[in-house]
Image (spheres, rainbow, N blue to C red):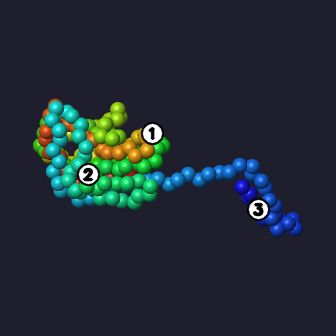
Amino acid sequence: SYLLTPCMKGFDFIELNLGYEYKIGKKIYGELYITSGATSFTLAAASAYSRLDPGTVWTQGLIKNVTTTAADGTMTLANAGTYRVDFWANFSTAALAAGTAYNFKVALDGTPTGRKVHVHKTDPGAETLFVSGSALLTVTAAQVLSIHIAGDATSSATAITVDEANMIA
């Protein structure tokens, strides 16, 4: 590996031997998003987590070295490594008690990780809520990334409508 630099004192270039090779990392990223979602999604019963899959409303965004499946809101991370995962969603709820919670987790291969973000209703009427989260995840090659949601004792088995959402890795 060599670096050539211009010199001001009569030389055209000076050659510096850096003594090592710097390997540039492979660019890896993927995006799934929902815009103007209108499909109702029913939460699992008994506060169980299930993949956030409101029909075929996910759309593939920019990707490089990642495979997305917009039909079910999943992303296959072909290369092992550490990924930053960002997620946000605006969603509409049913008219349920104030304080009712909605819980979100990132999942690998269908198994939710231990990290949880949640949002609570502030009004007993129907509401539009916003939730976001980020995580660094170490994955093995070909693991499948998705977002899972669960309700609490009040919101389990009720429907939400995801109006807008985004998942990036």
Helix, strand or loop under label 3: strand
Badge 3 amino acid: Thr
Position of 39 relative to 140 (above/below): below
**Residue 37: assigned label:** none
- Kindly identify the residue that appears in the image at 75 percent across and 49 percent down: 19
Along the line of sight, the residue nearer the viewer: 107 or 84? 107
Q: Earlier in the sequence, mark 3 or mark 1?
A: 3
Q: Which mark is residue 138?
A: 1
Instruction: Say what amino acid the circle numbered 2 marks.
Output: Asp
Check the image and report above or below for 97 versus 66.
Answer: above
As measured in the structure, the alpha-carbon distance from the residue carrying label 2 to the one carrying label 1 is 22 Å
**Mark 1 residue type:** Thr
Q: Which residue is mark 2?
A: 72
SS of the residue under disc 1? strand
The earlier-in-sequence mark between 3 and 2 is: 3
Few, some or many residues within 10 Å of mark 2 (<14, 14–19, 20+): some
